[in-house]
Image (cartoon, rainbow, N blue to C red):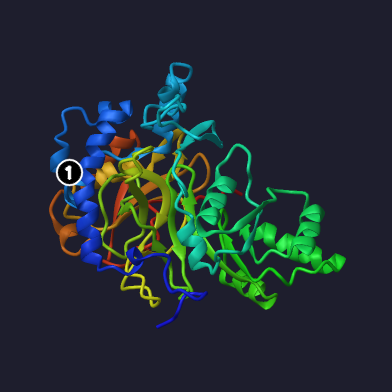
Amino acid sequence: MSAPPGDQPYFDELECRDPLARELALMAALPAQVQHAMAAAPAFAELFAGLDAAGVNSRAALARLPVTRKAELQARQQRLRGTDALGAFGGYSAIGWAARGGRGAKRVFQSPGGVYEPEGQGADYWRAARALFAAGVRAGDLLHNSFSYHLTPAGSMMEGGAHALGCTVFPAGVGNTELQLQAIADLRPQAYVGTPSFLRILLEKAAELGVPTASLSKALLSGEAFTPSLRDWFSARGVAAYQCYASADLGLIAYETSAREGLVLAEGLIVEIVRPGSGEPLPDGEVGELVVTSLNPDYPLIRFGTGDLSAVLPGRCPTGRSNTRIKGWLGRADQSVKVRGMFVHAAQVAEIMRRFPALGRARLVVEGALAQDRMSLHIEARAMAAVEGLSEQIEAAIREVTKLRGDVVWAAPGSLANDGLVIEDARSYQ
């Protein structure tokens, strides 16, 4: 078994508990969280009107609820802006401003696009400590935090996790490369958190200027793609770097371990992989959109679509952590393309395929030159192609859903790539 970095193997006992016990605990907590969301968050009260929350006690029942995506949250925030504290969060939050003697948001953040997120009062609110621990960060370390401290929550997210571990934090933020290098040389921090690109900038500039950075031996990186080649580049310079996947809405979602085999899901989340453009769960191993239900009482997001593609990895992490692993970030699920002046979205492809549930994986391909484009829906099937009139029925559904003509192309099972792509723009732009 590959041991995690550091002296103690796990952040807590939850990481290695029996998977069935974890699943039972999540499903036992789910009905109460749905009921809480309906009672405390006006958006979910409206979305789930008439729902019997007690019946949402399984993954199958959860999958019948609608997925809330960022665009819907943003639109509702814009519509309710200026009404009250809960309206600032679109009615999806259970907390507003902190009132005397009451529970409220400690901070408010703004993500790109003018989306506002609350930070509750709890210690390690974003649950980042678990990812920091897996990266080897320990009590007594000095953490050089190069995530942004303004507008977006990344800096605060990592600081809260570091404090929960008993670390001291240098709030470096972004930019000011030479000042940050001076602080590293003077204070000799053991750990870095930030984007991989900025850590590389720091190390390259340090080498150029002759600034010592040997104290930095571990790093937790996020916010950008972290390739194996870049990981090896850091390792050659004495930094063992790990990655985590987090969002401003949900906090920590998954984190890397010393096994370097995918990312282990964080505790306290129910994660589904669904067909892009729909809420339909996919079998393990299929690439789809990552949808998360959070048990956070302050921001009880139920089936929140991240818009990110990923897939479940089989088996357990070699470190002994027992939670589900995902492959990490594999692209964006919110695919769309413009065909003859009309937008076609992944949700429309999902709607077409929903009408023919016996069919397999599908991909809408747009080909040809501009102004002469043609659209075809490639569908995996065995004997279905021989069913009389089926191609015509699907082509009629394409016209009805997209308002555009499209042909059906039958493909052998397993011939379409398992990459989550449901719309492929193969046109020539020359």
Q: Nearer the viewer, residue 300 or 328?
A: 300
Q: Nearer the viewer, residue 403 or 213?
A: 213
Q: Position of residue 381 (x, y in %)?
A: 22, 61
Question: Where residue 47 sits in the image (x, y, percent)?
Answer: 26, 30
Q: Determine if residue 147 is in view.
A: yes
Quadrant of res 34: top left
Single out the residue that lies furthest toward the bottom: 1
Residue 260 higher or lower than 391, as above or below: below
Other residues around mark 1 within 10 Å, as few (<14) / some (14–19) / many (≥20): many
**298 with respect to 134 (left or right):** left
Relative placement, left or right, of 115 versus 178 is left
Q: Quadrant of the N terminus?
A: bottom left
* Most foreground residue, 118 or 335: 118
Q: Which residue is mark 1?
A: 56
Q: Which residue of the protein is positioned furthest toward the right in this rendering?
A: 209
Report the residue at 80% width, 69% height from top.
Answer: 212
The answer to whether residue 177 is above or below residue 236 is: above
Q: Residue at x 26, y 43 (%)?
A: 352
Q: In the image as oriented, which residue stretches furthest toward the top?
A: 83
Which of the two residues, 295 or 50, is positioned nearer the viewer here? Answer: 295
Say which residue appears at 56% left-offset and 71% top-offset.
228
Residue 141's image quarter? bottom right
Residue located farthest toward the front when viewing the structure as drawn: 101
Q: Amino acid at mark 1?
A: Val
Q: Residue at x 37, y 52 (%)?
A: 290
Find numbered disc 1 in the image and state the secondary structure of the residue it sits on. Answer: loop
Residue 194 visible, this angle: no
**Quick check: 244 left or right of 202?**
left
Instruction: Give the image location of residue 35, x and y in percent.
Output: 22, 36
The location of residue 114, given as percent across then percent down, is: 54, 31
